[in-house]
Image: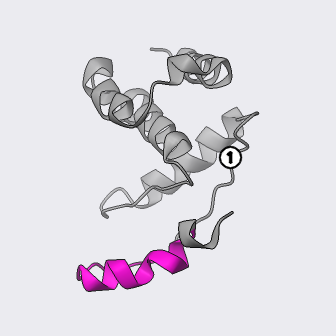
Amino acid sequence: MHPSWSLPARWPYLAAASLAHKWTRRIPVEWRDPKKADFDRFSETMREHQDDHVLVQCAANYRASAMTYLYRVVVEKVREDEAAEDLHAVWDPNDNATWREYINDIKMAGHM
């Protein structure tokens, strides 16, 4: 990981914006092989901090935006088209077979 992508490298920017930071959990998600357990850990962390403002990030924000999209749709029951607007502002997972399949599998497991 490039050092400028790490959360500690971003702390000065958060402080300058008067934002408090608390390192909660690192959830490594393998780009080429995301697992259901990754989404489960992500969901658990989000539920633990449901009353907090949470920054979700990754190197390019592809994994972060996909996980956030899935959480909003599967757990929070946000309308899929509404959640997809935010996801597609970052990227279109339909352009990546691995992530297209992963997202569909998680949504199906969530009984959408």
- 92 left or right of 105 in image: left
Q: Residue at x 46, y 59 (%)?
A: 48
Is 59 colored magenta in this rendering? no
Vertical comparison of 111 with 74: above or below: above
Q: Residue at x 62, y 49 (%)?
A: 41
Image location of residue 47, percent across then percent down: 44, 52
Q: Nearer the viewer, residue 50 or 97?
A: 97
Vertical comparison of 5 with 42: above or below: below
Is residue 46 visible in the rendered image? The answer is: yes
Q: How many marks?
A: 1
Image location of residue 3, percent across then percent down: 62, 73
Q: Nearer the viewer, residue 31 or 40?
A: 31
Is 18 colored magenta in this rendering? yes
Image location of residue 10, percent across then percent down: 45, 75
Quadrant into which the N terminus falls: bottom right
Is residue 110 visible in the rendered image? The answer is: no
Q: Nearer the viewer, residue 50 or 100?
A: 100
| Amino acid type of the residue tagged 1 in the rendering | Val
Residue extent of the magenta highlight:
6-23
Determine which quarter of the picture holds residue 58: bottom right
- 7 left or right of 33 in image: left
Quadrant into which the C terminus falls: top left
Q: Which residue is mark 1?
A: 29
The secondary element bearing badge 1 is classed as loop
Q: Residue at x 28, y 18 (%)?
A: 81
Q: Residue at x 36, y 28 (%)?
A: 88
